[in-house]
Image (cartoon, grey):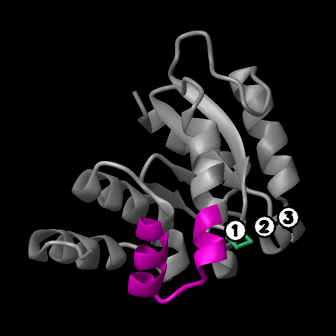
Amino acid sequence: MEFSQETKQKFQEILSHYPVKTAAVLPAVHLAQEEFGYVSEEIIEYLAKFMDMSPVFLKNTVSFYTMFKGKETGKYLIQVCHTLSCSLMGAGNIIDYIKEKLNIDVWETTPDKKFTLVKVECLGSCGTAPVMQINDDYYENLTEEKIDEILSRLS
Ligand code: FES
């Protein structure tokens, strides 16, 4: 089993958008799903080797991903990292601020189906904590002002 040449190119393109490979796991899994139509254990092993990372890490991420994609999400999936660096840099306050602003709890979607808020493990950008990812875009060094600005730009 191997990625096609076209997929390998797409993969390199994806990697160039992320600070570290671990941050590109979800798009890489998407790519594998596109290529093979599913994500089996064998594909995870292949992808882990391809990305030079632990298959266990990849497997955990995929199972987490399946968990949240199993639910209906809003147009914008707000994933706020709450792992150590982000947590120390105020991720808890950031999450509370978004909860209050959107009037939803974690794992909930706004009634207009625009935003879903989730907490995630390390997004691989610890040096710029606190960090969140909305769909495919990263937002770093978050503050309440930045969140106001980011959310107001999303329509
Ligand atoms: S701890 Fe948040 S990005 Fe790593």
Q: Are marks 1 and 3 in contact (CB under 8 Å)?
A: no
The residue most toward the bottom is: 52
Q: Is mark 3 within 8 Å of ligand 1?
A: yes
Q: CA distance from mark 2 to mark 1?
A: 8 Å
How far across and down, in percent of the image, does residue 101 sit?
A: 72, 28
Specify the principal SS of the magenta part.
helix
Q: Amino acid at mark 1?
A: Cys
The quadrant of the picture occupied by the C terminus is: top left
Q: In the figure, is residue 146 to the left or right of 85?
A: left
Q: Are marks 3 and 2 in contact (CB under 8 Å)?
A: yes
Q: Residue at x 39, y 65 (%)?
A: 28
Q: Which residue is mark 3?
A: 87
Label 2 residue SS? helix
Q: Is mark 1 within 8 Å of ligand 1?
A: yes
Q: Which residue is mark 2?
A: 86
Tell whether position 134 is magenta.
no
Q: Residue at x 62, y 61 (%)?
A: 61
Q: Which residue is mark 1?
A: 122
Q: Is mark 2 within 8 Å of ligand 1?
A: yes
Range of the magenta residues?
42-59
